[in-house]
Amino acid sequence: MPTHKHKPEILKGALRVVTLTAVILLAGCTTLPPLTATPAPTVTPTPTATFTLTPEPLVPTPLPTATATATAAPTLTPSAGATATITPTVTATAPVTPTVTATAPVTPVTPDASPRSIPADGYTRIGVGLAMGGALTDFDWGDGLPGWYLAWQVKQAPELPGDIRFVQMVYINGDLYKPDLPQILIAVQGNPGSLWLIGNEPDVKWQGNATPEQYAAIYGPLYKAIKEADPTAQVAIGGISQPTPLRIEYIERILAAYEDQYGEPMPVDVWNIHAFILREERDSWGVDIPPGMDDVNAGTLYEIADHADMVIFRQQIVDFRRWMAGKGFRDKPLLVSEYGILMPESYGFPPDLVSGFMVETFDDLLTATDAELGYPADDNRLVQAFCWFSVGDSRYPTSNLFNPETHEVTPLGEVFQAYVAGLR
């Protein structure tokens, strides 16, 4: 997903263009029940309700009940990471420690506030997902510290070692969201110029679990509140699990629901997707059918061996950019906020295949351009930033960069560090 060309400007003042990304966790060995929050029967455009989540809000997606004889995807040979001389364009600033009080008045920040978005240069486009809590500095990154990270939550004072950036995420479930609006606005004030993701896989019933109407009702007031408090903030739509025709139809229903509810087109500063390759079939393994699409029983019926197919991976990105261009969104950045390999090694995904997939996708995401579909402000690159899942997760260890228990770097993590260090 990496690309390295000129540095376009998206925002005024010190804020540089962001090539953003975000990540979400999919696929699990067992199906877990959805979050216990019960959606209100009537959706209204005012998102005032909140709900309680456990500290780790990510819920697994069911994996297929395959055996070790499942057909493996072809082995990929890692290619050398692209080299480039990178001069970071944004100087990291110490996070503001806000006074946490739900009644604190919100004072809009000025457009020239210190930027906290993701700069658009080489390694700074590469992000990681901190899936199991803790701190990023719990892990020894050496010279391979990525350019940004997310933790599937809102942080009022995110940890920012070196020149890294933090991407904020408001977590949603149905027509409920977390944290409440006063706490969100405190974080907005304390972190001007940040990228905000509204939800995580709303299209997956054991993740965001939102119908198009529910998502539109939450997104509208949150977008307005964040932008009024910080005009330099960028707001991204919640990442769908994968950009298939079925998931794109789900997005189109969101856009239609928003316009119906608010009487105007839905504002999106940054388009955001995940790039997994998982089966779309009701009550099957993979990502099932999006909420609110009761008239559909199946979408794209991927098989296990497709999970690391580079042809499919590339085509999904191109197809989504083509959809963006067709809808008049070509002048918007595209973030891939979560992707990786979720299948176990026993399903045909050994370490050499995973490392090859990671390197090849990094190469593509950093360099892929299209004169008709790419983002004009970024030399027509297809993707502006992307996020690998994950730093470390005990449930889905195939793509771990570190051991989540010992914090020791994995062989895959060593490949990641060498790649990033080569771009610095």
Image (tube, rainbow, N blue to C red):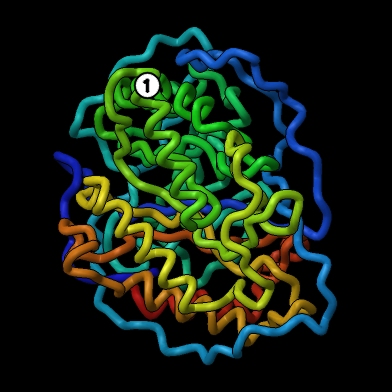
Q: Is residue 214 left or right of residue 341?
A: left
Q: Does residue 34 appear in the picture of this structure?
A: yes
Residue type at the position of mark 1: Asp
The C terminus lies in quadrant: bottom left
Q: Quadrant of residue 187?
A: top left
Residue 382 picture location, percent across and down:
30, 64
Residue toward you, 199 or 146: 199
Determine whether, in the image, residue 328 is placed left or right of residue 71.
Answer: left
Residue 301: horizontal and vertical position, in percent?
Answer: 62, 64
- Which is more toward the observer, 41 or 174? 41
Q: Position of residue 393 (x, y in %)?
A: 70, 59
| Residue in front for this viewpoint, 368 or 151 | 368
Taking the spot 43% from the left edge, 74% from the top edge, the residue there is: 362
- Quadrant of res 252: top left
Is residue 149 visible from the viewing direction of this image? Answer: no
Q: Where 24 falls versus 356 (above or below)?
A: above
x, y percent for residue 167 = 44, 45
Residue position for label 1: 260
Q: Quadrant of the N terminus?
A: bottom left
Check the image and report above or below for 324 versus 171. below
Q: Residue at x 77, y 64 (%)?
A: 64
